[in-house]
Each structure stands twice: as structure tokens, then as C-alpha cells.
Image: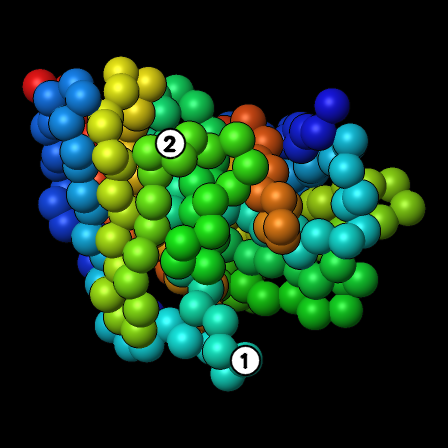
Amino acid sequence: DVVMTQSPLSLPVTLGQPASISCRSSQSLVYSDGNTFLSWFQQRPGQSPRRLIDKVSNRDSGVPDRFSGSGSGTDFTLKISRVEAEDVGVYYCMQHTHWPHTFGQGTKLEIK
Amino acid sequence: EVQLVESGGGLVQPGGSLRLSCAASGFTFSSYWMNWVRQAPGKGLEWVANIKPDGGEKRHVDSVKGRFTISRDNADNSLSLHMNSLRAEDTAVYYCAAWGSTNIWGQGTLVTVSS
């Protein structure tokens, strides 16, 4: 199985400051059709997960543009340009290039 | 309104069976890959199974293979997960999720396996 490793696992951030989460995969996530199936999810306390970004950098509808995704191959990053209070929660990367789909361990973002 | 509503969770003894259901509305269910994802108490997300839009292809994670079966009824806009030989480690909130250009999640249903 593809292992997804996130860092850091805990991320205290001051309101208005940027935040960055790294996600590394144990093998390349480039599919045979050239797509890279790496997604980012947000799970706010007590809520269901919500996809923020698909295929590395494509923001889902309704996701604020302060969220951005980048990366390639085995190395990916989720960035929040200016953290707001509503961003508190756990962030997961997930690959769906290889079977079985696998998630990272999660990064807990909190406000300092 | 676009939504997925899970049902069928509850308390079951080890070795028992349970059937989870997920009712879809507000979107073209038959166009989406459908998934079950679970989350053990206080833990991260684990993908469990998925099924192609036409139901012709199904996949299950190794830890549930042979015990769980995903199925769908496009005429009824519904998704199911039949769970047999349940173990304590299957205790989790089970989410159904539609994945495609849009990503839709249900609110989850709790399955507790305990004697």
C-alpha cells in the first residue's frame, strides 16, 4: 500500500499568519494517464470531512482562495495564506492513484 | 439539496452482522463513484470500499475483504455496505461519500462492535 506521511502532525498558527502542511507518498502518484490523484480534506471539529483540493491543485467549489495546493510526484503541500478561526480542524492528504486509496495521518491545525 | 444520509449503525456483538445504507438526493447518483470511508474514535480516516457508477467494479480494502460487501441501486439512489464477521477493530463512524467533480459526504453512522 502507498504510505502517506504528513508533517507536522500539530500546527499552532497565529490568526492572519500563513500555514503549510507537507504530504509525502511512498511512491509516485502520477497515474498512467498523466494525472496525479492527490486530494486534501479538511475536517472541522464534530463535522464530516470536506474536500478542499483535488488533483494536487484544483480547489473545490466554495473553497476560499487562501487555500492552495502544489507539488508533484511524491511531494505535496497545502498552504493557507492567512489562517482564519474557521480553519481550525484536522487536514488530511489522500491519494487515489493506487489501490487501495490511502490517507495521511492528519495534521491538527489550532490557533495560538 | 445535495445530500447523503447514512443509516443502519448501532451496537453489535463480535462476529455479528450489520447493513449500512446511504440515501442520495439532489445530484445524479448514477454518475458518481461511491465510497465508504471510516474513522475509528479519535483516529484518522480509512478508506473502506468503493464502487463504479454502473456497479460493475467494486474494491475493498484488505482488512475487510471477504467480510464486507459494497453495493448500489441506481434506480433507488442508494448505497449499501453489508458487514459480516464484525470485529472490535471495525468500530468506527462510517461515512458514505460521492467522488467526482464534486465531492459529497454524509454525516456518518456509528458502528460499535462490543460484547
**Left or right: residue B96 compared with residue A28:** right
Q: Position of residue B91 (x, y in %)?
A: 41, 38
Quadrant showing the N terminus of chain B:
top right
Which circle marks residue B40 in the picture?
none
Residue tagged 1: A33
Q: Report the residue marked by disc 2.
A: A43
Vertical placement of B44 versus B85: above or below?
above
Direction from residue B21 to residue A14 in the image, left or right: left
- Residue positioned 23% across, 26% down in the render: A83
**Which residue is most to the right?**
B75
Q: Is residue A4 left or right of residue A99?
A: left
The amino acid on which the numbered mark 2 sits, given as a three-letter code, is Gln
Q: Secondary structure at mark 1?
A: loop
B85 displayed left or right of A106: right
Which amino acid type corresponds to the residue marked 1 in the rendered image? Asp
Instruction: Name the element at disc 2.
Output: strand
Residue at 71% over, 29% down = B2
Colour mapping used in the image: rainbow
Determine crowd level at label 2: few under 14, some 14-19, many 20+ residues with C-alpha closer than 10 A: some
- Residue B10 spot, x, y in % from top left: 55, 27
State whether residue B97 is above or below residue A82: below
Q: Position of residue A7 (x, y in %)?
A: 14, 50
Image quadrant where residue A74 sits: bottom left
Give the residue at x 46% y 33%. Answer: A63
Mark 1 closeness class: few <14, some 14–19, many ≥20 residues within 10 Å? few
Front residue of A56/B79: it is: A56
Which chain contains the residue that carries disc 1? A
Q: Please tell me if label 1 and label 2 are on a single chain.
A: yes
